[in-house]
Image: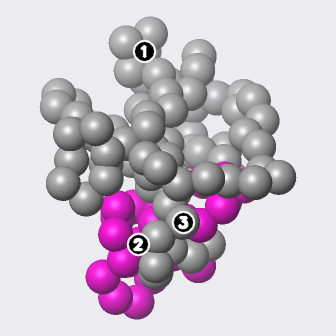
Amino acid sequence: MGIVLGIYGATGASGWTSYTGSQPTIYYISKAAGASDSNTGLAPTFTSGTNGPFLTLAKGQAAMAALTNGTEAWLLLRQGDTWTNENLDEIEKAGASSTQPI
């Protein structure tokens, strides 16, 4: 059991880590323009409507906590962004396997 936190941006052009392999659920958190806790969190940049990253760590954590056990998921924080007076607590969930954690 565990959470995979990624600091994205090292290889992606828009500031996100590029992943290969299985397609887990990926939630994005960013301080960039268009980020909002009203967004789905499933897109790295805001495009329209609610298609964009979350703004706060709390919203990302709530999305992860709502997942069903056995789901592979990633929570990515945008490289260079800063979250002040916010934290991530332990999430009591199990991933799909030991090689596909939450």
* Callout 1 touching callout 3 (CB < 8 Å): no
Magenta stretch secondary structure, dominant? loop
Residue 91 vs residue 56, the one in the foreground: 56
In the rendered view, does 29 fall on the left or right side of 79? right
Q: Tag 2: Cα neighbours inside 10 Å, few (<14), some, or many (≥20)?
A: many
Within the magenta stretch, is there residue 8? no
Q: Could you tell me which residue is drawn at 61 percent across and 53 percent down?
A: 82
Instruction: Kindly tell me whether residue 3 is visible in this rendering.
Output: yes
Q: Tag 3: Cα neighbours inside 10 Å, few (<14), some, or many (≥20)?
A: some
Residue 79 vs residue 87, the one in the foreground: 79
Residues in magenta? Answer: 38-60
Tag 2 residue: 52
- The tally of labels here is 3
In the current view of this chain or complex, which residue is farthest to the front? 80
Q: Could you tell me which residue is drawn at 54 percent across and 66 percent down?
A: 31
Q: Amino acid at mark 1?
A: Ser
Quadrant in which the N terminus is drawn: top right
Distance in Å between CA atoms under marks 1 and 3: 31 Å
Look at the numbered disc 2 and give the secondary structure of its residue: loop
Q: Tag 1: Cα neighbours inside 10 Å, few (<14), some, or many (≥20)?
A: few
Q: Amino acid at mark 2?
A: Gly
> Of marks 2 and 1, which one's residue comes earlier in the chain?
2
Tag 1 residue: 97
Q: Position of residue 81 (x, y in %)?
A: 53, 54
The label on residue 31 is: 3
- Is label 2 or label 3 in front? 3
Look at the numbered disc 1 and give the secondary structure of its residue: loop
Q: Amino acid at mark 3?
A: Lys
Q: Position of residue 55 (x, y in %)?
A: 59, 67
**In the depicted structure, whether residue 78 falls above or below residue 17:** below
- Is label 1 or label 3 in front? 3
